[in-house]
Image (spheres, rainbow, N blue to C red):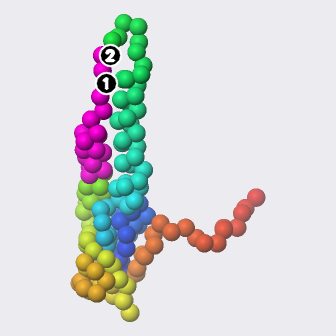
Amino acid sequence: MGKKIIVIGGGPGGYTAAIRSAQLGGEVILAETANLGGTCLNVGCIPTKALLHTTGFYRRAKDNAMPGVIISSAELDWPAAQSHKNDVVGRLSSGIGVLLRYNGVTVRGGIAVPLSGKSVRIGRDARSGRRHTRDRLCQHPARLPRRRLARRD
């Protein structure tokens, strides 16, 4: 059995760190308070791009007539656009879950609180939850170094 590793956060840095750790033989738990995929996938870049794609298609259909093609009307169905966006986000987030399961990563929903020693509590809030022991903790997998790396010429 490999080292017990707990990764806090299921964003791009967290889920890739968890998958790679499991591939290298670690027994990995990933703790995530919300949906897998992080801010970009769930509320930022991906939802925005899905809506922009829909509205861009609407604009092209509405504004760009072509000789021989008559477009009598184009309407934007905002609830359907929102539903499409939610479907895209859901498929991508569930795909990350499948990758994690396939690689043997255990996903625990909740807030992860590092405790003294080698344990972490994962639960609905900071004071409750199940205690997990660990050999390694990956707490900020996507955080960049604060110091600028030395430049090589």
Q: Is 130 in front, or is 125?
A: 125
SS assignment at label 1: loop
For residue 66, above or below residue 95: above
Residue 103 shows in the view: no
- Seen in the image, is 96 located left or right of residue 11? left
Q: Quadrant of the C terminus?
A: bottom right
Q: Is 84 in front, or is 100?
A: 84
Q: Which residues are magenta?
A: 71-91
**To which quarter of the image does residue 138 belong?**
bottom left
In contact (CB < 8 Å): disc 2 and disc 1 = yes
**Looking at the image, which residue is at 40% across and 46% down?**
48
Q: Which residue is mark 2?
A: 71
Kindly report the secondary structure that dominates the magenta region of the rendered protein.
Answer: helix
For residue 79, above or below residue 104: above
Label number found at residue 74: 1
**To which quarter of the image does residue 75 belong?**
top left
For residue 146, above or below residue 70: below
The location of residue 31, given as percent across then percent down, is 31, 73
The location of residue 78, given as percent across then percent down, is 28, 39
Q: Residues within 10 Å of mark 1 (few under 14, many from 20)?
A: few
**Looking at the image, which residue is at 26% across and 52% down?**
90
Three-letter amino acid code at the position of disc 2? Ile
